Image (cartoon, helix red, strand yellow):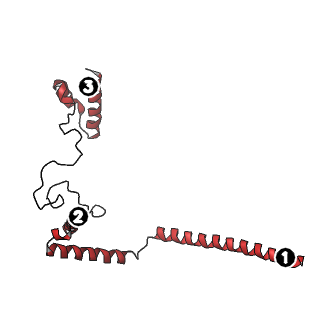
Amino acid sequence: MTASEQELELVLSQHFSAMGIDSHMFGDVLEQADPTEKFLEHFGVKGMKWGRRTSNIPAGETRAAQKKPGRRVTAEGGRGVRAHEDAIRSATQRQIAKKSTVDALSTKELQELVNRMNLEQQYSKLAAGTVSPGRKFVNDLLINTAKQQATQVVNQQASSLIEKQMKKAGAK
């Protein structure tokens, strides 16, 4: 057994033990395997970017509009909740309008997009009023510290000006 085969067996046994599987069950299989099957081979196009496809897109259709996995539409839910299909549809329409023009959208799609964007804007304005206690504490701390520093600087400048005026008045 070569060093690379021993290393492979060690890594596999660690993974199997982490999953609760007895690694000795697979020892015979590894020994019988062809050495050429033990490495990963890439059959891609050299210099091709990941996630890019060379297939032609049908006329009048953009990548965002295609119902294929891997489309670059960002619509996220929060804390383990998937984004709603309306949000995904809105993000797709927004991307189509951004890439080309709003002429690429039907009247109904454009109306849905505008309605969704208005609702999102209204919600963000309403939700902006809620401030977490930690953020409120930090804001108050910064404001109070800034006020104290400003008061201290003004008092120092005022006292130095008063002292200068007193010296001038006493010198006369």
Q: Which amino acid lies under the numbered mark 2 shown in the image of this protein?
A: Gln
Give the left or right position of residue 59, taking residue 64 as reference.
Answer: left
Examine the rendered structure and indicate whether residue 15 appears above or below residue 49. above
Instruction: Please give the label number shown on residue 168.
Output: 1
Which residue bears the numbered disc 3? 5
Q: Which amino acid lies under the numbered mark 3 shown in the image of this protein?
A: Glu
CA separation, marks 3 and 2? 49 Å
Q: Which residue is depicted at the point 16% across and 72% down?
A: 109
CA separation, marks 1 and 2? 72 Å
Quadrant in which the C terminus appears: bottom right
Secondary structure under tag 1 reads helix
Q: Position of residue 15 (x, y in %)?
A: 28, 37
Q: Position of residue 10 (x, y in %)?
A: 29, 30
Identify which residue, 172 or 157, lies in the foreground.
Answer: 172
Secondary structure under tag 2 reads helix
Q: Which amino acid lies under the numbered mark 1 shown in the image of this protein?
A: Lys
